[in-house]
Image (cartoon, rainbow, N blue to C red):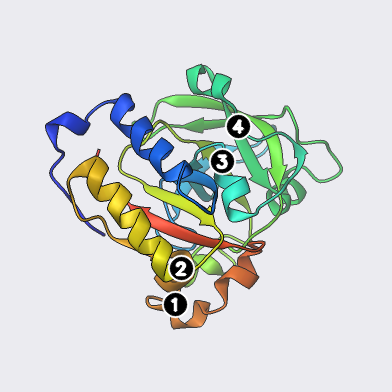
Amino acid sequence: HAYFEVPEGLKGTSAQAALLDAIKSAPGVHSVAHAATVPLRFEENFHFSPPGQSPQYTLSTHVSPEYFKTLGIPILWGRTFDAADAGKSDTLPVIVSQRFAERFFADQNPLGKILQGTDNTGKPKHYEIVGIARNRLAGFGIMAGSINDGSYVYQMAAPLAKEFVLVRFDGDPTGFTRTLQSIARQATGLIVPVETLQYYLDTRNTHLRGFHRLLGILGGVVLTLTLIGVF
C-alpha cells in the first residue's frame, strides 16, 4: 500500500470527481468504482443483530454504487446503492450476500429488514437491507473458513477517501496500466501504484490464483488503483 501526503490542491470532491471522470473517459473503460478494501484482502468486520436474534458479526466493506457492475457481481433481488443513499443518516442501506439472507432470514424476504448495529465509536446504528447480491468468496486466512461462511454485507461508501479505485476495461492490461498511471499522475502529481486485481492477489496469495473465476468476474480486466493517502 502506498501512503502519500495529500497535495493541497487535490482536497475536495471536485478534484476527486475530476480524476474519476478522466478514468471513465479513457478508451476501453466500462465502469469505475471505489471501495474501502480489495476483495479477499483487508476485509472489515460488521457487528449487528438481526430481528429477534442474538448479536452476530460477518465480513463487510464500503463500496460505491458502481462496485457490483465493475466486479461483475449481479444484484439478484432489490437494488444497488444510488445517489440518494449518500444523504441518509438514520437508517443506512446495506446489500447482503445470498448466504447472509439464507443464514439470517431463512424462509423470509430479507428486503426491507432492519439490522441493529453500531458504528466505529459504539454509537447505535440501523441498517436496512435494500438488495441481495450473488455470493462471492470472502475473507482471507482464517476468515475464509467457518468464521465467515460466505455471509457478507456491503455498505455505502462515502466519496473517495483512503480507498481503492477499481476499473473494469477491455484491452491490453499492460498498456492500460500505463494509461491509468498517467491519468492518476496528472490528477495527483504522484506516481500511484496500479495493478490488475488478479496480479494483486496472485503475488500476495498463491492459493488465490485464478481468483477471477472463483469470484465470478465476468469478462474484462479489473485494475486496482491504490489511493490510500492521496485524497
Q: Which mark is residue 81?
A: 4
Spatial CA distance of label 2 from label 4 is 29 Å
Amino acid under label 3?
A: Glu
| N-terminal-most mark, 1 or 4 | 4
Q: Nearer the viewer, mark 3 or mark 1?
A: 3
Residue in the image at 52% along x and 32% along y = 117
Picture layout, residue 111 above or below residue 37: above
Does 12 sit left or right of 54 as displayed?
left
Amino acid under label 4?
A: Phe
Q: Which mark is residue 66?
A: 3
Disc 1 crowd, CA 10 A, few/some/many (<14, 14-19, 20+) = some
| N-terminal-most mark, 3 or 1 | 3
As helix, strand or loop, the secondary structure at mark 1 comes to helix
| N-terminal-most mark, 4 or 3 | 3
| N-terminal-most mark, 2 or 4 | 4
Spatial CA distance of label 1 from label 4 is 30 Å
Amino acid under label 2?
A: Pro
Spatial CA distance of label 1 from label 2 is 15 Å
* Residue 100 percent location from the top left of the image: 68, 49
Verify CB contact (< 8 Å) between mark 1 and mark 2: no
Q: Nearer the viewer, mark 2 or mark 4?
A: 2
Q: Which mark is residue 202?
A: 1
Verify CB contact (< 8 Å) between mark 1 and mark 4: no
Residue 154, quarter of picture? top right
Amino acid under label 1?
A: Asp
Residue in the image at 42% along x and 36% along y = 21
As helix, strand or loop, the secondary structure at mark 4 comes to loop
Verify CB contact (< 8 Å) between mark 2 and mark 4: no
Does 164 sit left or right of 108 as displayed?
left
* Residue 111 percent location from the top left of the image: 75, 32
| Disc 2: which residue | 173
